[in-house]
Image (tube, grey):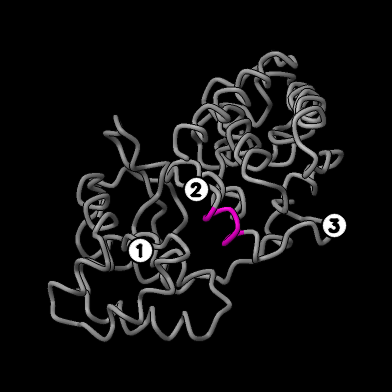
Amino acid sequence: MSSRHAIESARSINVKEFLERKKHTLLSCFFNPLRSELIESLGDLLLEQEITQNNNHRNIIERIVKVFDEDTIQIASCYDENVNLENSEEVFILDETNELKEIGLFSVKQMQQVLKIALNKVESLNVEEKNSLTSSNFRLDFITRFRKQCKNTKLRSIFYRLLNKDFFYAVKMHKYKMTETPNCARCGQIESNKHLLFECKSSSEMWESYNKVMNNTSDDFKQIKSFDDIFDFGGNALVNIVKIKLIQETIQITRPTYWCQGRVENITKEQKELNHLNN
């Protein structure tokens, strides 16, 4: 379950081709509405199963998932960008006492216990509660909107991690003894998820530059003036993808400490050129 290659292979299975190969013609037809929303792989399908509010979609997904081998579904469900990175060698998980341990130290029986605990803790997506939002800036339809706007799987993953408060901020890492201090490496204050993304001076400078650049670039734009505004993905593709790319830089192990308008302009220009090539 910790093999990056096994997990990526399971998640990358093309659902349409799989159903046709297994002679499930009717299910293949039922799958077409999901394909129109850019759901192609098994990984996309499992993500949609977690977040969809559409009962018809949910019923179709449940029927399709039953066609797959249970082990394949289980492996595909184990994806975590934090442990499945390109050069990752050590994998750490929490045992039944919530102590962080290297996965190689677990026996088969212990792994079974951890899996049962994990499955019992699966929750429905509640962005407002997880991120302590004080307004209704986030809507569930933003998920479908962003999926259609962004084909980059890594940026999609960062978007979903943002919604699930799944970044490695210093308070979280210190709790699991991954760092010596819960303080922000940039400003020295306590680094919570909110501090990492918005409250740190460097992050505030980044969003100020983003506001200036987007104000001159797009009419479909809402300025980021508060932490809650980060979760508003009602804008166009350029606005939303540039936002995610800035978040992508912010969550790197070495946090960016210098932001200027020119840096955001370069990211925006690159994204414009990429969109032009794709179109």
Quadrant of the rendered image containing residue 140: bottom right
Q: Is residue 191 above or below residue 158?
A: above
The three-letter code of the residue at mark 1 reads Val
Say which of marks 2 and 3 sits in front: 2
Quadrant of the rendered image containing residue 242: top right
Q: Is residue 168 above or below residue 269?
A: below
Residue ID for mark 3: 134
Measuring 29% from the left and 29% from the top, which residue is drawn there? 87
Image position, residue 153 (x, y; %):
42, 45
Q: Nearer the viewer, residue 164 or 249?
A: 249
The three-letter code of the residue at mark 2 reads Arg
Q: Nearer the viewer, residue 189 or 131?
A: 131
- Residue 261 - label: none
Instruction: Name the side, left or right, on which 136 lies relative to 111.
Output: right
Point out the stretch of residues depicted in magenta. 143-148
Say which of marks 1 and 2 sits in front: 2
Residue ID for mark 2: 156
> Does dot 3 land on a helix, a strand or a loop?
loop
Badge 1 vs badge 2, beta-carbon distance below 8 Å: no
Q: Is residue 173 above or below residue 113?
A: above
- Residue 114 - label: 1
The three-letter code of the residue at mark 3 reads Thr
* Gap between marks 1 and 3 measured at Cα: 34 Å
Which is more N-terminal, label 3 or label 1?
Answer: 1
Instruction: Name the side, left or right, on which 191 lies relative to 136.
Output: left
Q: Main secondary structure of the magenta part?
A: helix
Image position, residue 11 (x, y; %):
29, 57
Other residues around mark 3 within 10 Å, as few (<14) / some (14–19) / many (≥20): few
Image position, residue 170 (x, y; %):
61, 33
* Gap between marks 2 and 3 measured at Cα: 24 Å
Q: Is residue 161 magenta?
A: no
